[in-house]
Image: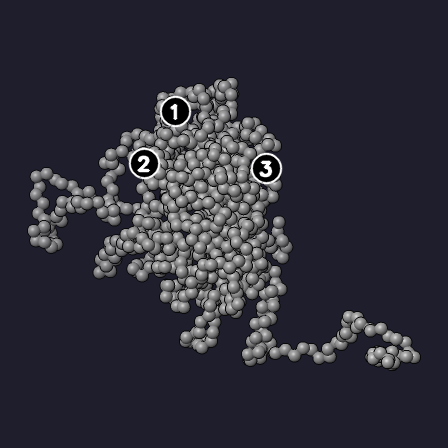
Amino acid sequence: MAVCSRLPLQSLIHKHAHVCRTVRIVHTNAATEEPVYPPVLPSLTAKSRSSKGRRIAEHLEKIRAADVHEKLDLLTRVQRKKYVLYPQTFALNADKWYQHFTKTAYVPGLPEKFIVDEDKEKSVPATNNAHFSIDEKTFGDIRSYVCHSILQENWYMKKRRPFLQREQEHFVSPFLRNLISGLTHTLAKHNPVLQLSSLDFDPQVNFYWMRGQRTIPRGHRSGRVEPIRFQIDDKPHSQIRIHEQLTQFVPLEEVISAEVPEIKLAPDLLPMFRRQYENNIFTGVKLPDPLCHGHTQFHMVPDRYRRDKMAKRNLTDQVEVYLRANGIASLFAWTGAQAMYQGFWSRMDVTRPFVSQAVITDGQYFSFFCYQLNTLALSVETDAGNPRKNVCWGTDSFRLFEEVKDGAVVGLDDRVLNLLVQFLLNK
Amino acid sequence: MFKETAKRFKATAPLLLQSALFRQARISTIRVGNSVHGHRYFNVSCILNAKVLPRKKPRVKVDIPGLERITYADRMHFVPGLAKPFFPVWERDWNDPSHFYSSKLEEMPLHKEKQCFIFSQSTNPLEGVRQALWLTKSNLTKGLPDQVLSLVNNKANQMENLDDRVQNAIRHACLWDTTEEEPSREKYCGTLVRNLLHLCGSLQATHPGLGRRIFAEKYSLAATWSRGDELFQVRGKNGLLLNSMDPLPVVAGKEEIQNTADHILETFYPISPTIDLQRVHVYKELSHTGFKDDYPYPHAHTLFILRAGDTLVNLPPEQLRAKMIMFAFGNALTRAQTLHGTKAGVLEEPIVVQSVATDGQMFQFVVFQLNTTDLQPDEGVKNMVWIDEDQLLYDSAIVCPVLKRKVVHV
């Protein structure tokens, strides 16, 4: 019996012909044909929805293609009414609202990098911290320098009685300036980043962004949907700027357990008020400065928000809230402005996190905040599927010293000095 | 009739003017500066920028003894022909600061017969450095002493990339510090000094001795001394003082100090050396460094004076140098008086104080050495001053190029 086999058809066909092996279709460029007609696009100037869409798309393309200077100019050119967000605000429970506006999750405590001693007596200088280590002698020098600065302003220097409501500017502001410059110069030996840093006093930080949308209730544009604009104009007491970005605390895509509070009420109810003026985005220096990244900001609590004044108004519980709101808003503005200086904006989200730190103090009580900006995409279109959120770590206020009595500082707390040193040694 | 109305108008016009000016005075106390331009004051109905007339002396009431004055006091209203009653002065039994009437100068507790000339931070002395040298009994040497210049030339004291860092500091202060086009002079003057001080402070890594210093802002100095027959004082806030735990090393040796005794102080007759100084009869003879005795940084190291500082007075360079000399001298004198008491005499260890002043572009450097507190006679050992004047840090730092007739002006 003949073996049943299938004869390949190919051999029959090509019996007398040349056997072609399977010809693999080599990847060749298909013969490109030049389109004869231009692409069909909606009109640029017509009064139609598609035309409006094309105009918006072209504008966005223009922004994407521009360099940083023009980008900032294009984004801040049009002035409209915007909510002015004050980092130092009298509004009650402002920290939750600010977290919502800036999409920030607040984590109590500091990142693992920093060691916070729980007990006052057991505090040791930052000698056993793996990341930051200085020797006992330097820490002793720092401690005596801090004591001398406190005493200089409160005891040694001959001063007139301060004008009413100007005690902070009279006593605390010069002490802070001395403290910051002294600490920065002493720790420059241990942290090379501080060697090349710049220390600004009374800088200006501005940031402009859009978050959420609203339907215009009345007027010739009523019924239309427009984004809600915000502006922060902050004046920290001082800030340190460095050449390179601080290392991130957590990776960019990490899921943080803390939630961003959502507030469905309009910002007017905080209260927040709308004004129209120049939209500024400013880190403290203009674009050409090479020291464009932020290290630490120092804020001084004004007289109105001192503990004793808040206690007189029965707002003791709002003291910590105020500090948190200040930390979140100021640091968001600073890191956001730094990110925008690098060319990122809401439709081009940050590819690396921007990190900064802040210390808020009223001369006696110090609070520490760390901020990581993971996303700038806060507007409605860009926030739709954005899982990232900004993170702010913060502590409650620690008391640096109890009082100044007879030419000596009573009750100096080493924990605060520890944290200050660790903050400044961060790189 | 017109003459009478004219007379009455003239009588009332100064009153109207004075009341308007009084209101203007209250307005100007609220506003910073005295400009009323651009502001609308609805509570005033007459001119706001008239000349402020000097206060007229009130008419002296003569009391003739024996002559009883018949007044309209008991009638409780004006009666033509009767004298105006004299009511006793009513004094509030508590101190109301908005109704404060100061007593006459002669009745003040600190009033003295002898006048005193005070040099403060807004003094603009006519003769500048010459006047300051006469007042402080000093000798001038142009150029900084070798001791300071050797520190400058020492390689160990220099930092890497100094040029770039200084240029960045200047650019930051003069060009980049604001959202506006360019920052104002007051702002960039202060920022530039702070930036340069931060640069110097970063040298603390290699020179740990820099950690034994601290800055003092808004300190008040008081120094008193007599020259010839007159009493002089240096008073008030002047600038940023850098205090140190260790004194500055003496610049000039004993021989040079003795040689200064031969020099003659320059006088500028017919101008008196007390010109432009504030002459007062109410003063306290005080010598105070501005800090308590147990201050851990007792030695004044360097005084940084900005062109205007807190005052509204912009001094020209010559007068700015005079201000530097006077305040450096004041600091040195108070230190000497704290150490050795008020007894005048030649110091065994001279005290050295430095000073740096700037208007944002031009820098002046002064090193002052106090050799003697015996300032009354014109002869004897003199103090010594070294000045390095009018040093431009940079030629220009402008945001937009200056265009004149379509050509860039350099």
Q: In the image shown, does B392 or B152 lie closer to the viewer?
A: B152
Answer above or below: position of A419 versus A71.
above
Q: Position of residue A201 (x, y in %)?
A: 47, 47
Secondary element at image label 2: strand
Is disc 3 surrounded by few (<14), some (14 to 19) or many (20+) residues within 10 Å? Answer: some
What is the chain letter for disc 2? A
The answer to whether residue B146 shows anywhere in this view is yes
Mark 3 to mark 1 CA distance (whole Å): 37 Å
Which residue is labeled 1 in the image? B339
- Identify the residue position indicated by label 3 in the image: B159
Q: Which of the numbered marks, if any, corresponds to residue A405?
A: 2
Q: Residue at x 45, y 53 (%)?
A: A393
**Image spot of residue B69 (x, y percent):** 9, 45
Question: Do discs 2 and 3 belong to a common subunit?
Answer: no
- Disc 3 or 1, which lies upstream in sequence? 3
Tags 2 and 1 on a common chain: no
Q: Chain of mark 3?
A: B
Q: CA distance from mark 2 to mark 1?
A: 26 Å
Circle 1 packing at 10 Å, graded few (<14), some (14-19), many (20+), is few
